[in-house]
Amino acid sequence: MVGVDLNLMKTFVLLYETRSVTRTAEALFITQPSVSHALRRLRRQFDDELFVRSAAGLAPTEIAERMYPRIQQALEVIEETVSGTGRFDPATSQRSFRICATDLGEIGLLPAVLARLEDSAPHCAVEVTPLDMAAAAQHLRQGRVDAVICTPRIDAPDLWRDGLFRERYVGLCARTHPRIGEHPTLAEYLRERHIVVDPAAGHADADQELTRLGHRREVAARVPHFAVLPELLARTRYLAVVPSGVAGLFTRSSDVRTFELPLEIPTVEVSLYTYRRALPAPGIDWLRDLIRRTLRHDSEWSTSD
């Protein structure tokens, strides 16, 4: 595009991110009429409304949705180049990386990544945000997170997917549970009450398989995170389903034990997702490689294919 006005592009990015003329004006330290004028120029330039009023503020049009990731990345590269940070040096960089993961990822995967980061990039930092599967892909496109680690597959052509390892599911209960042995029958399993983790955490495979078989678990409690399961189970006679990778951590830290599930649940693959950027992103590429090298070779979590 000839004659690109970078200030207009900055206005577009902020309008997309804030959904507000007022907040965009505040961020740019200009008046609201100036932002409105810039929006009119943007609409003429792209021959589209770009943003329309809604109950939640300015809603981007389909064209604006497609434009935002590329414009945001282009501005990011320009700013990095002008400031002299167009390349990434892990030994000296003070960058803060944003990784999206479940609480299981925080407990079982983040320690290995952080240890490798400390050795390779001693001045960098990591900010972990909770996984929201419904918004994960969009957060990558918008640059709100640099990487997503999760089990559910995200099928999107503009995302890189790197398979890290596979794992299976096991049952978890109190160590002294009086009725559940190492290999309970399906009838024994279904007679018990269960603690279920919110599907938003990315693990709903057990209930999907039970539904396929025409069964359902009697739910005693629903919780948003896996991290609370060990203590809840240790103090009750309830059952839960957890990925095998974290089960060992739970049994070592709490008075719980595992058992084999009486139904076949397919193994799942934990994957790393990053955005396929149109322009170079040395820092993100470095982070992607670090996570792949770290988690693909971590003996406690890795499973053979």
Image (cartoon, helix red, strand yellow):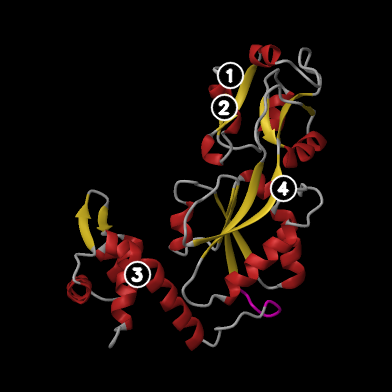
Query: Are discs 3 and 1 less than 8 Å apart at CB?
Result: no
The kind of residue on which mark 3 rests is Val
The percent coordinates of residue 259 (x first, y second) are 77, 25
Q: Which residue is mark 4?
A: 108
The quadrant holding residue 225 is top right
Q: CA distance from mark 4 to mark 1?
A: 27 Å
The kind of residue on which mark 2 rests is Asp
Q: CA distance from mark 3 to mark 2?
A: 41 Å
- In the rendered view, would you say 129 is above or below 122? above
Residue plotted at (59% across, 76% down): 282
Q: CA distance from mark 3 to mark 1?
A: 47 Å
- In the rendered view, would you say 199 is above or below 161? above
The percent coordinates of residue 62 (x first, y second) are 28, 59
Helix, strand or loop for the magenta stretch, by majority: loop
Mark before the other along the chain sequence, 3 or 1: 3
Query: Are discs 4 and 3 less than 8 Å apart at CB?
Result: no
The kind of residue on which mark 1 rests is Arg
Mark before the other along the chain sequence, 4 or 2: 4
Q: Nearer the viewer, mark 3 or mark 2?
A: 2
Q: Which residue is mark 2?
A: 207
- Considering the numbered disc 2 on the image, is that residue within a helix, a strand or a loop? helix
- Considering the numbered disc 4 on the image, is that residue within a helix, a strand or a loop? helix
Query: Are discs 2 and 1 less than 8 Å apart at CB?
Result: yes
- Considering the numbered disc 3 on the image, is that residue within a helix, a strand or a loop? helix
Query: Are discs 4 and 2 less than 8 Å apart at CB?
Result: no
Q: Which residue is mark 3?
A: 13
